[in-house]
Image (spheres, helix red, strand yellow):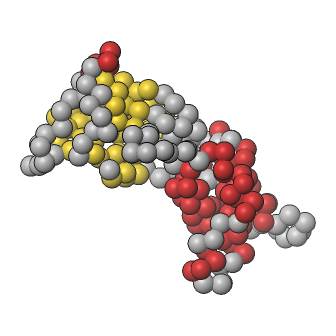
Amino acid sequence: MILTEVSAPSREAMPIRAFGEHLRLGSGFADDGSQDAILELYLRSAMAAIEARISRALLARSFVVAVSDWRSDACQPLPLAPVRSVESVALLTGEEDRAEVAPESWSLMRDDARPRLVGRFGRNLPRIPRGGRAEIRFVAGYGAAWGDVPADLRQAVFLLAAHFHENRGEGALSGRMIPFGVLMLIEAYRAIRIGRGAA
């Protein structure tokens, strides 16, 4: 399975002002915007780290997942939640010939933690060509605006971004460590997977 992010969150959707205020609580410094680029970098890094750990997209955007085999004949779990919509399903041959799959033959089974693409009316998903793959294009995320993201996940992003900011001069090791407070905030969102068949 290969997951590709098609479009990153826009700069306007990133809470740069709010994060700047979070870092400057009680400092009294005037904000001239000169640090916006570096604040945005820390926010994006923190978002990416948290999304990877909980398999959830925070801000809504498009992704494509490619699979060479369905998980089962009638069901393919999607690697991120929450999925807002599936835009298309296509089958590609080993020679890259592409055929769109009719939307009438599949549907999205919505689930807050384990969304799935399933064959409609209990039917199997279309067969993937030998040596080829299926590509599923979908939109995942809580919403287009920062306020759509659950409050505990917003706080986790700010705490982790602040940690990156505060430890920016201490080398790569500190950047890989997630503070305990962040782990506590995101723990409830981590999916529990048991066995190969778990979504």
**Is 93 on the left-hand or right-hand side of 29?**
left
Pick whichever, 95 or 187, lies toward us.
Answer: 187
- Is residue 76 or residue 13 the one in the foreground? 76
Which residue shows up at 56% across the image and 50% down it?
Answer: 54
* Residue 53 quadrant: bottom right
Relative horizontal placement of residue 183, taking residue 192 as reference (left or right): right
**Count of numbered circles in the view:** 0
- Horizontal relation, residue 128 to residue 61: left or right: left
The residue most toward the left is 95
Residue 158 in view (yes/no) = no
Q: Residue furthest bottom?
A: 170
Q: Position of residue 33 (x, y in %)?
A: 70, 66
Q: Is residue 163 visible?
A: yes
- Residue placed at 37% from the left, 51% from the top? 3
Residue 154: give x, y in percent of width and height.
Answer: 69, 50
In this picture, is 12 found above or below 70? below
Residue 126 image offset from top left, x and y in percent = 21, 29
Q: Quadrant of residue 45?
A: bottom right
**Vertical comparison of 174 with 41: above or below:** below
User: Which residue reaches farthest front?
Assistant: 195
From the viewer's perspective, is residue 92 above or below residue 110? below
- Work out whether residue 31 or residue 164 is closer to the camera in this orientation and state it: 164
Q: Quadrant of the C terminus?
A: top left
Q: Residue at x 23, y 46 (%)?
A: 68
Provide residue 143's location: percent of width, then percent of height: 58, 38
Position of 109 with respect to 91 (left or right) is right
The residue under the point 69% across, 78% down is: 167
